[in-house]
Image: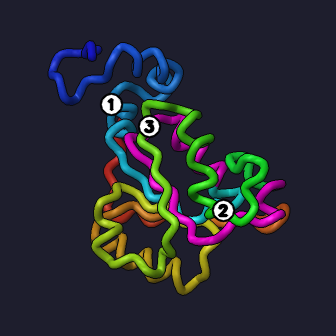
Amino acid sequence: MVEKEEGGPGGISEEEAAQYDRQIRLWGLEAQKRLRASKVLLVGMKGLGAEVAKNLILAGVKGLTMLDHQQVSQEDTRAQFLIPGGSLGRNRAEASLERAQNLNPMVDVKADAESVESKPAEFFSQFDAVCLTGCSRDVMMQINQICHQSNVKFFTGDVFGYHGYMFADLGEHEFVE
């Protein structure tokens, strides 16, 4: 791996510099390096979850774990582009894995078929950010509290036809210029 700048661990490779050139010019090398070091948990792999996964993977996070305990439904085959045909009855996260990984081989994409409710509080601390889609209010509040106490960035949202919402709890956050 050829380092783009001196300093080793903080640098990015020539391949990464070429891949993320537009982003680096837009928000700077430091922001891209922080993004490349981020591990994200994405809960819910319906239509919105697939869009969020695509954007995070193309942006170049270090790792993305897609967590969903539901099976692929007929509706999912029309609303979720990461699920290949013939996946009815498979787990949504696992069915989405191959196409998600193909978007950017430099991102470590994983699938987790368990329920978010079954995860212990310690599970969430391994991530820099947690994104929930399609979860109940009780689950959102529970996971937000866990993330807030662990200093993990928390995002949640959902869509309903032409309407949607998004909430972010970034705790203490310092912006980079």
Which stretch did the figure color magenta? 50-78
For residue 53: magenta? yes
| Label 3 crowd bin: few (<14), some (14–19), many (20+), radius 10 Å | many
| Image point (49%, 71%), residue name | 114
The residue pinned by badge 1 equals 30
| Image point (83%, 63%), residue name | 74
Judged left or right of residue 58, residue 92 is right
Q: What element carries label 3?
A: loop
The dot on residue 107 is 3
Image quadrant containing the N terminus: top left
| Image point (36%, 46%), residue name | 38
Q: How many marks?
A: 3
From the image, state whether disc 2 or disc 1 is nearer to you. Answer: 2
Residue 93 locus on image (x, y percent): 58, 58
For residue 74: magenta? yes
Q: What residue type is labelled 2?
A: Arg
**Image quarter of residue 99:** top right
| Label 1 crowd bin: few (<14), some (14–19), many (20+), radius 10 Å | some
Residue contact between numbered discs 2 and 3, judged by CB atoms under 8 Å: no
Q: What element carries label 1?
A: helix
Residue contact between numbered discs 1 and 3, judged by CB atoms under 8 Å: no
The residue pinned by badge 2 equals 90
Judged left or right of residue 123, residue 52 is right
Q: Which residue lies furthest to the left in this view?
A: 7
Decide which of 157, 175 is in the foreground and name it: 157
Q: Which amino acid does label 3 sit on?
A: Val
Judged left or right of residue 53, residue 172 is left
Decide which of 145, 80 is in the foreground and name it: 80
Q: Which amino acid does label 1 sit on?
A: Glu
From the image, state whether disc 1 or disc 3 is nearer to you. Answer: 3
Residue 73 locus on image (x, y percent): 77, 66
Residue 51 locus on image (x, y percent): 66, 49
